[in-house]
Amino acid sequence: MSYFDEITNPTWEYPIKSFFNAIDINHMLSVSGGTLNLEKYEDVTSDKWREQIYQRVSTKTMPDPPSQHWSDEMIALYRKWLDNGYPEA
Ligand code: HEM
């Protein structure tokens, strides 16, 4: 059991956007030259980024410290959210 087990229909509003903290947002804004704002639904779901984000978090090559790698439940929820067409709310 985990905190996220009850979520059958993940949306951007809950819980996906909560997976990105202020450190993640600031670092990726700077590393991507402003093209990946992890706070913005439009950027995270863009053709350019949504699968790349999955690649990085699922291989646990992102986020870098001091953030912590996502749990398997978080990774599965992000995958499910993409497969469901990434609903906003
Ligand atoms: C969940 C949070 C994060 C996600 C989804 C994420 C995602 C990504 C993605 C997709 C790339 C590839 C960018 C490209 O190809 O242009 C990348 C690169 C990078 N990220 Fe993040 N990132 C996260 C958090 C962080 C944090 C917290 C840091 C630093 C403290 C960081 C530092 C970097 C750096 C230095 C690179 C370039 C080097 C590399 O490609 O490995 N990221 N990240």
Image (cartoon, helix red, strand yellow):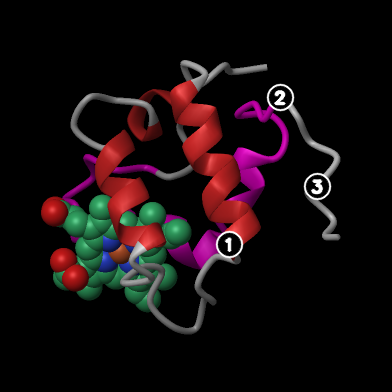
Q: Give percent across and percent down for residue 13.
A: 68, 29
Residue to which mark 1 is pinned: 72
Instruction: Examine the image and state in which quarter residue 72 appears.
Output: bottom right
Camera sees residue 26: no
* Residue shown at the point (61%, 40%) measured from the top left: 16
Residue to which mark 2 is pinned: 9
Label 3: element kind: loop
Q: Which mark is residue 49?
A: none
Mark 2 residue crowding within 10 angstroms, few (<14) / some (14–19) / many (20+): some
Task: Give the residues drawn in magenta, as a range.
Answer: 9-37
Give the mark, 1 or 2, whose residue is nearer the N terminus: 2
The answer to which of 84 and 19 lies nearer the viewer is 84
In three-dimensional space, the C-alpha distance between marks 1 and 2, rounded to whole angstroms, equals 17 Å
In three-dimensional space, the C-alpha distance between marks 3 and 2, rounded to whole angstroms, equals 11 Å
Residue to which mark 3 is pinned: 5
In the depicted structure, whether residue 61 falls above or below residue 77: below
Camera sees residue 18: yes
